[in-house]
Amino acid sequence: GINAEYGLFLHLTMKYNPGVSSSRRKNRKAHFSAGTNERRIRMSAPLSKELRKKYNVRAVPVRKDDEVQVTRGTFKGREGKIIQCYRKKYVIHIDKLTREKANGTTINIGVSPSKVVITKLKLNNDRKSLLERKSRVALDKNKGKYTEQTDAAAAQKASNEKGDKASLAAVD
């Protein structure tokens, strides 16, 4: 809209979904006050290239006993099994990632799930059905994509409709 009185030009864009906010304040509140079921989804990690090809799925929520490889940070390249998903802190603990404190006790180092790739999945029936469900959606990749074939089909359909209207006008 244009506010001529002050000479301001405001750029307004249409929101696709009014239920989704782009406010930083609201997004931070949603993140930190999320329940454990929502945190599970937020704590998703991408699959390795081989697993992605096998299951046709890009990312899944992490779980205990998945095997992962760290892709970012000091421990980049290190592999191990997830021993704990610490949802309260949004981190995962990996069996071989520990450090020694000053008093000699060893503690696990928390790693963000977004900074790892899953190299081996712990599969159970729920996980299998989740992968099946997600791959079904992924299989329909060309849905909504623009190609020359769709353009040709649209032009054909438009010309058919014009022809139908012309024939109806001739009948009248």
Image (cartoon, rainbow, N blue to C red):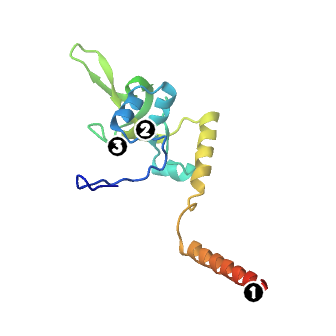
Q: Check the image and name the residue furthest to the front.
A: 5
Counting other residues with Cα less than 10 Å from the Cα at mark 1, is it few (<14), some (14-19), or many (20 or more)?
A: few
Residue 78 appears left or right of 164? left
Residue 109 appears left or right of 170? left
Quadrant where the image shows the N terminus? bottom left
Q: Are marks 2 and 1 in contact (CB under 8 Å)?
A: no
Q: Are marks 3 and 2 in contact (CB under 8 Å)?
A: no
Q: Is residue 165 visible?
A: yes
Residue under numbered circle 3: 71
> Which mark, residue 170?
1
Q: Residue at x 32, y 20 (%)?
A: 107
91 and 27: which one is in front?
27
Query: What percent of the width, then of the height, locates residue 11?
Result: 33, 55
How far apart are the alpha carbons under marks 1 and 3? 69 Å
Q: Residue at x 38, y 42 (%)?
A: 22
How far apart are the alpha carbons under marks 2 and 1? 70 Å
